[in-house]
Amino acid sequence: MSRKEKKLQLLRSVTKSDAANKTSILVDASKYIKELKNKVEEATAASAVDSSSSSSSGSAMAATVSVSSVDLDNSNSTNCRRGFRINVSMERSRPGLLVSVLEAFEDLGLDVLDADVSCADDTAFRLQALGSGHQGQLQGGGSGSVDEQKVRQAVLQAISKCINDDDE
C-alpha cells in the first residue's frame, strides 16, 4: 500500500467514511470538517452567551440557533428561489433581542416571509422564521452570497451583542 493510500485510509477511518474511491473519501472528509466547524462555533457561541449572562445575572443562558436551506418554489426548474428556515431558542429573553435578530436578517438582505415569535422579558425566547434573500443573493458560492453558516453566525452575533449591550 502506497503512502498516499495509507493516508486516504487513515482519513477514511477518522471521518468514519464508507466511501471506496478517493473523491468520495475527500467529499466525506469535507462534510466531516464542516460538521466539526459547526460544533466548535456552537460551543463558542454558547460559551459567549453563558459567560456574558452569568456575569450579569448569575445564571447561565443557553441559545440554540439552527438554520436550514429550503426551496421556496414548488417548481422543479433550475431557477427556484432558495430561502432559510431559522429557529432560535433561548431560556430567557432579553430586551431588544427580537429587534437585534431582525436587524441581523436585514443586514444579510433577508426578507422575513413568515415568522412565529414568542418573547417577553424574563421568559423563554422562541423564533421560527422563513427568510428569503434578494434575487441571486442566495445563489452560487460568491463571497457576497448568503449561506446557512452566514445566517447562523449573524444571528449568534446579534444575540451576543444584545446580551452585551444589556450588561452595560
Image (tube, helix red, strand yellow):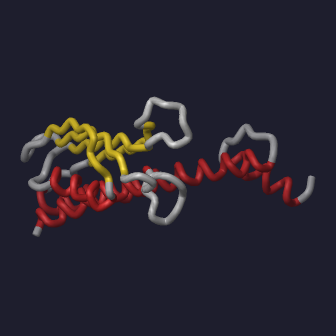
Q: Is residue 38 among what the camera can see? A: yes
Q: Within the image, what quadrant is residue 69 found in? A: top left
The residue furthest left is: 121
Q: Nearest the camera: 112 or 73?
A: 73
The front one of 14 and 67 is 67
Residue 43 coordinates in the image, percent (x, y): 39, 54
Vertical placement of residue 166 versus 132, above or below: below
Q: Residue at x 76, y 49 (%)?
A: 23
- Residue 47 appears in the rendering: no
Q: Quadrant of residue 103?
A: bottom left
Q: Nearer the viewer, residue 4 or 72?
A: 72
Position of 120 relative to 108 (above/below): above
Vertical arrangement, residue 63 with respect to residue 150, above or below: above
Name the spot of residue 5 as percent of width and height, x first. 85, 53
Counting from the top left corner in percent of width and height, residue 112 is at 26, 45
Q: Left or right: 49 with respect to 31?
A: left
- Is residue 138 rendered to the left or right of residue 98? right
131 and 101: which is toward the camera? 131
Q: Residue at x 85, y 59 (%)?
A: 4
The C terminus lies in quadrant: bottom left
Q: How many marks?
A: 0
95 relative to 8 in the view: left or right: left
Q: Residue at x 12, y 52 (%)?
A: 94
- Seen as rendered, the residue at the extreme top is 74
Q: Residue at x 60, y 49 (%)?
A: 32
